[in-house]
Amino acid sequence: MFAASHLFRSSVTPLRRFSTSSRLCSAIPVLQPWKTHLPAPSNPQSPLIHTFFHSPTSTWQFLVVDQSTKKAMLLDPALDYDPSSGAVDTKEVHGVLGFVREKGYSVERIIETHVHADHLTGAQVWKKLVKPTPPLCIGKRVVQVQATLAPAYAIPSSSLQNAFDHLLDDDETFQLGSLTCTVKHLPGHTPDSIGIQVGDCVFAGDSIFLPDVGSARADFPGGSASHLYSSTQFLLSLPPTTRIFSGHDYPGEDRSKSCFSTVADQKMANLHLKDGVEEAEFLKMRKERDSSLAVPRLLHASLQVNLRGGRLPEKDEEGRRWMRVPIEVKGGEEEEF
Ligand SMILES: [Fe+2]
């Protein structure tokens, strides 16, 4: 468990931008989807979905397409970051973008399901490369997350304002070509977490994971296991054949990675939330489990970029960018230093 107060004592780490303008973009291989999920034939609102797995952070990126118009939305795009060197690399964005161009899709929106704490978003790189520029959207409670966490990193308010192009309201609907998409507030993992419901699919971000993984942690500042339980109960109340797409997967050795399961599968087998698990039992499990989880490896870099909507920290007077990393003294007293 960690609290926002842990973030206030900081050192800094240099940030290098591995700009693809300095190398031939054509040399970056086009990424092919891990899988392409066809629309459900019985549901005219069912989307075509290409799924891309960002292995370094076990993150699923979803390219959701209306087949009739080739209009697409991109959920939770990832950006490579090496905390040892401070290097940011855009090859993941260019790889997925190459696929988008091969298919002739028009990316209409970029959506973040929440402010991620385990990977950097590639949203701003996408915005630079795609024309016309798609709006970057996130749930409206991102302002609450920014207010809680940005002071710890001394992020200027000017970098928070307009970090995102559109704040999605609860139950807001929008069109993706002929498909109607609905925003669902799914708090718990973070207060700003949302899902996107379209046809027989829900892109649920970090709420419920594959059945043998269970559920997302709820110990981030503003997180709530009780809210997470309520959010998952909404998901599990959907029709049994509904496909729930999760934001990450952490498979064990006995299966390969996967990105979705049906409501029926989840109700039958979810490690934390199968039928019969009451809220009190879930809260006890979540509290015990969260207290044993490590701080995400890319926590500080992720927040400093993602709170800014994917922009890097501002340059200093010498033209360099820096990440701030808090120091926590363990095994002794701070006065010893
Ligand atoms: Fe997350």
Image (tube, grey):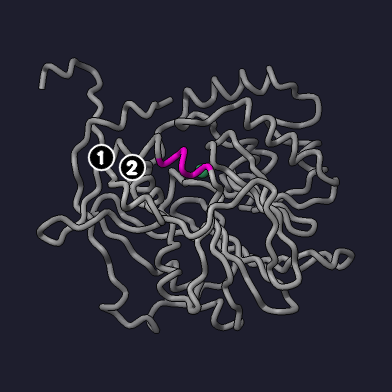
Residue matched to label 2: 300
* Residue 240 locus on image (x, y percent): 85, 46
Q: Are marks 1 and 2 in contact (CB under 8 Å)?
A: yes
- From the viewer's side, name the closer residue of 24 and 307: 307
Q: Is residue 157 left or right of residue 257?
A: left
Numbered range of the magenta stretch: 141-146
Tell whether position 43 is magenta. Answer: no
Report the residue that reaches farthest toward the right: 42
Rendered position, 261 above or below 233: below
The residue pinned by badge 1 equals: 325
Mark 2 element type: helix
Mark 1 and mark 2: span between their CA atoms? 6 Å
Secondary structure mostly seen in magenta is helix
Q: Residue at 68% across / 19% down in the picture?
A: 281
Figure quadrant of the N terminus? top left
Is residue 137 or residue 77 the one in the foreground? 137
For the C terminus, the quadrant is top left
